[in-house]
Amino acid sequence: MVVSINCLLLGKTSFNDTFAVNIANNNDIRGSLVNINNLKISDLKFLIWNRKKDTLGVNDSDIIELWKVDIAENDENKLKHVTTEDDIKKELGGKKLKPLHSIKKHFLEQLLVDENIHVIVQLPAAVESFSMVMEKILENVTRSSDKTPGFSSSIPLRERNMESAIKSISKNFKQSFYTPQSVAKQTLQFLVCCGAPGIDVLVDPHSQQPVPDPDFVSIYLDFESEVRLNKYDFKLTADSAIALRIAFKFFAYDQSYEMDFEYFCKNIYRYFKVDSTKSLREFESTVNLHNVIQSIRMSRYLNDNQTLFIFLHIDEIQAIFNYEKYWINEHQSSSKEFTMELLCTMAQYMMNNRTFIQTYLSGTALHKVVKLKEPTGYSFNYINCPLLSMDACIEILNDFAVKNNDTNYWWTLDRSFIKFLDDARGLPRAIEYILDEILKED
């Protein structure tokens, strides 16, 4: 190492948020070794981007702006008032670094104080880190202290044979560790809930390949009620639409913030001032699946070598098909309909061993799902989900009541409630909702 440059993102106000970028005699710049004497500021941008790419939400290092400063730790208070270019100039005496200038001129020919901040990194306003956006969106939203944990996290399996689903998930996950060129699209399977028998799964010739233990996350999206497609989605890509919903469920709903999805959308649209095609594209450059996933990884403190496994349940898929006629696709490069584009987007993460997403579809328009098989090129494993017996419903009821310390549940003997259980034998999720509401009451 020849020199270490201490950096801070514009908007951060603490020395605890600084990070160092080390410059060596020879540096790997986009696959080529560049000697320190030939390094330019544009190369420093790349080194900074490469050091923090999982958290910046930026795909192009050239759009980053760098400012040379010299801030001692005892001047940390100055950072609280710095949010714009003018602030950098006036408060910190910053000088914008030009891409073609030599690094040597600015950082080698002048003595740097090891503990000081040397560079302020400025991101375009529209590509702020998604984590930073979520902090600002949720900072004034209250959190419920007595929110009942979701029943779905503890619902016991009854009379449902999941062997076929497990085989599909296992095969998909293992294939994510192969090179993309060696995996045929038709071998990747979406899971679909239906009444038909599960299809057989081919034996995986690489089934003995060791797979590291992943970090598991389960996300449930109900497109009929909780995260309905609405006016905010009319011009969004499918990528941003699904990213918005995953972000809401993971960062807001599951963290007990007292806001519904529509209010969440209003806040985030207001934050980005989405009122034109230009601002919409800027919104999508930040609110996309890649950035949301990176923020989830950060929140779970995963390093680059750890695998994140997300089980994504998309329920009430008929609501997505019904929405097709309202969706305006302004991206001329894509001729896909919304649902097809959504599945193609999610399929990319079945070939990603760093973040693997298994998508599970359910609802009442499964005949339309079948029609998607040929144009997408992917396969669907139809999971058999028969009606539960009344005994199984009672077992689920008992299990949930005991876990909630409600052992005197006389209300379960009510004739209308028993009729409800009988009607809901094919809908464990409906049983979940009604039990959740009953046990919330005093």
Image (spheres, grey):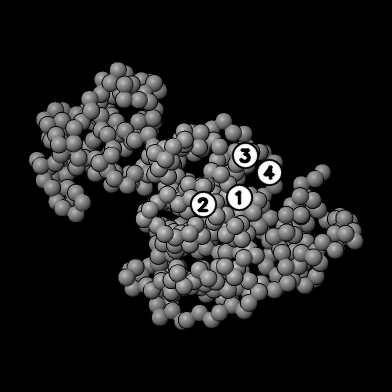
Between disc 2 and disc 4, whose residue precedes?
4
Q: Which mark, by number, is residue 252?
A: none
Residue flagged by tag 4: what amino acid is it? Lys
Q: Are marks 1 and 3 in contact (CB under 8 Å)?
A: no
Instruction: Name the residue that disc number 3 marks.
Output: 259
Amino acid at dot 2: Trp
Please give the name of the residue rendered at 31% of the width and 25% of the height, measured from the top-left corner.
85
What whole-number distance in Å separates the C-alpha atoms at marks 3 and 2? Answer: 25 Å
* Residue located 68% across and 55% down the image: 151
- Relative to residue 378, is residue 140 drawn left or right? right
Q: Does residue 283 show up?
A: no
Mark 1 to mark 3: distance in Å?
A: 15 Å
Q: Nearer the viewer, mark 3 or mark 2?
A: 2
Residue beneath disc 4: 147
Q: Position of residue 55 (x, y in %)?
A: 38, 44
Whichever of callouts 3 and 2 sits on the residue coming sooner in the sequence is 3
- Residue located at (87% from left, 55% from top): 411
2 or 1: tag closer to the N-terminus: 1
Whole-percent x and y of residue 36? 12, 42
Crowding at mark 2 (Cα within 10 Å: few <14, some 14-19, many 20+) = some
If the image is split into quadrants, where does the C terminus sit?
A: top right
Cα separation between marks 2 and 4 = 35 Å
Disc 3 versus disc 4: distance between alpha carbons?
12 Å
Q: Earlier in the sequence, mark 1 or mark 3?
A: 1
